[in-house]
Amino acid sequence: MRSVLFIIIGFIFVSQSTHANPVYPPFEPIYEVREERRHLLKMSDGTRLSTDLYFPITDQKKLPIILMRTPYNKLSAHTIRDARIFAAQGYIVATQDKRGKFESEGYFEVIGGEDIQDGYTTIDWLSKQEWSNGKIGTYGCSYLGEIQILQAPLKHPALQAMIPQAAGSAFGKAYGRYRFMSAFNGGAVELAAGLGWLYSAGNKLYLRPPAHLSDTDYLKHIDKFDIAPKLKGIDVQTQAWTLPWKDALENTDAPPTDFPEKLMIPLDSDFWETTGLLDGNETIDVPALHVNSWYDYGMAETMLTFNLFRENALSEKSRNGQYAIIAPGTHCQEEEATENTIVGKMPVGAARYPFWQYYLAWFDYWLKDKQDRLKDIPKIQYYIIGRNQWFEAENWPIEGTTFTKYYLNSSKGANSVYGDGSLTVEPSASDKKFDEFTYDPATPVPTIGGSVCCTSGDVPPGAYDQRPNATRQDVLVYSTPPLEEAVDVVGPIKAVFYVSSSAPDTDFTAKLIDVHPDGTAYNIQEGIFRVRYRNDFEKPEMMQAGEIYKIEIDMQASGAQFAKGHQISLHVTSSNFPRFDRNLNTGEENASETEIIVAQNKVHHSAEHPSHVLLPILPADKLKPVNVEKIKHHFTKVLTAKKGGS
């Protein structure tokens, strides 16, 4: 295996949520870095996974190791950048192509299969090398974060710390959520993300070197070739309209992927038991820094993982070693915040934070026993949009939170912003007992922003003005009067509706909106529920026409202030397309259906059927501000002391 000195000339990361470079960029390097390309690590079944190693040039014989396992190419500029940042601070860094991806052998499968055991085998190999001090940390965002979470229950003794970022897709049945790689949400399919991600990152076809070629010859020539498929790209907005939607990639240049098969597996299938996705019964014994953003698709799952790791920890070290930080932005964009952060189209202020300093201090604490690194660092740090400020807490939900019901009301009808739908803290006393709208799957309500991901910009994430949807007759709009005092909504959000329909099955959606005095209506959080799963995700039941059913819509979690003079608003309808697949209302399997039934859907709001949204209200006197500059100063002080040695 040859060593090469690999020099990064530059790297620019394009953020979907900011318009400038980060305020707190990575620190100055302490060491030069050398790279060893393509160690082929043999897994338990003989499959070899390609792993690159980055070494700081130092006299120290044994060092801690940071591992990043990726399906996105370990030679991507982003991965190389991160590896070299840590290596230049005195860590050996290992980056590995996931099984079946790029330079690694084997068959690629989205989550599950041999993937988790591969991580264990890799950690075991790294911990036994002569240059290892026996302590391993893991790092990475999205898929790289999720396989860290799934690695934790195997409890390899060398795994001492993790930084899983945007890792919501690690959830399976835990806490009754049935998210399964975030492919499902309330029983509906995350169609836009499934199409976009599986097309671009889920392909299973890669060129492999011929058997007679030596590693030396491979390394000599491989940089002249592109071993990944060259894809033209797809328009997710267009392809999502395909019926049946299982054929949405049929007329594209997509190589073999897990679309649509993985998205068509029933929620009650035994397959999900084989994936290793969290079911809530796992035990863990590793500290973790859980990082995510309010506009990420798995925000609630991140904080539930934080709680699960605390509850199921086998030691005080791991129980007390669970930390979290929640930024205001979108998927994997935390470090890109500036003094003028924009999330979608909404300005959220100075969301900058010394993330990289925190990451380095985290690994120093757990892998190098530097006890000063996390001194006085809160367990949870979170950003409140609207207040545009960082706060701290010790538990989730946050101490002092009051879960408050805002009831749906109308006297004439809540159809569109021109109706008289209202949100009140008292149940409805109106003679009007329900609001009704026509849901036609041929004309669904379009997705405008939200916690979407991985659609190549076709369905942009974040906060956008929702007024175009608010004028539709198939959108019920409920709003408070302009607030006399500010209201801070921080924590998990849920809508409880009493519904009926003319169709055997349909969906209901809920979207929480912050309406500004000038009328701009920014989406805060949203959710969906497929009514067939109202009693049990594993036992779907069709609806009877006209019968009223209670459903609960998980609206994830948020941290936002509705300022004085603003209005809290809720949009209710039956589609959010193409983020979610359209329920065609037939009661059959939507993925294979082409028939459409138009449904007459009702949301009931009487004393007997008090539909409401449950908001986590955090009183102002329970807020504990974080002094970000003080934290930055602390990290700078303790990390600067590293220079000249580790």
Image (cartoon, grey):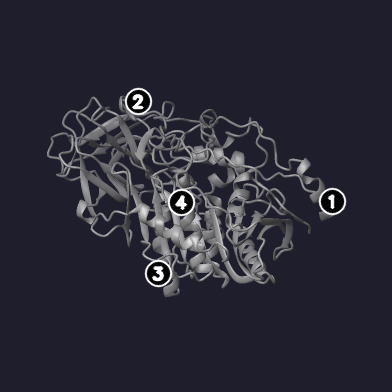
Count of numbered badges drawn on the protein: 4
Among all residues in the image, which is located at the extreme bottom?
A: 315
Is 346 displayed left or right of 172 in the figure?
A: left
Count neighbours of disc 2 (C-alpha within 10 A) and say few if under 14, some if 14 to 19, many if 20 or more: few
| Residue matched to label 3 | 320
Q: Which residue is mark 4?
A: 179
Q: Determine which residue is flagged by label 1.
A: 217
Identify the amino acid type marked 3: Asn
Quickly name the residue at label 2: 468
Q: Which quadrant of the figure contains the C terminus?
A: bottom right
Which mark is first along the chain, 3 or 2?
Answer: 3
- Which is closer to the viewer, label 1 or label 4? 1
SS class of the residue under badge 1? helix
Which label's residue is closer to the chain start, 4 or 3?
A: 4
Please name the residue shown 38% across and 32% down the image: 464
Instruction: Looking at the picture, tell me which residue is in the foreground, 536 or 136.
Output: 136
Between the C-alphas of marks 4 and 2, the distance is 30 Å
Q: Is residue 311 above or below residue 541?
A: below
Distance, label 4 to label 3, CA atoms, is 27 Å
Q: Mark 1: which amino acid?
A: Asp
Q: CA distance from mark 3 to mark 1?
A: 49 Å
Residue 268 seen by the camera: no
Which quarter of the picture shows residue 207? top right
Quadrant that contains the N terminus: bottom right
Tell whether 181 sits left or right of 614: right
Residue 62 locus on image (x, y percent): 64, 70
* Chain-order first, disc 4 or disc 2: 4
Pointer 4 local density, CA inside 10 Å: few below 14, some 14–19, many at least 20: many
What is the quadrant of residue 319 in the picture?
bottom left
SS for tag 3?
helix
Mark 2 or mark 1, whichever is nearer to me: 1
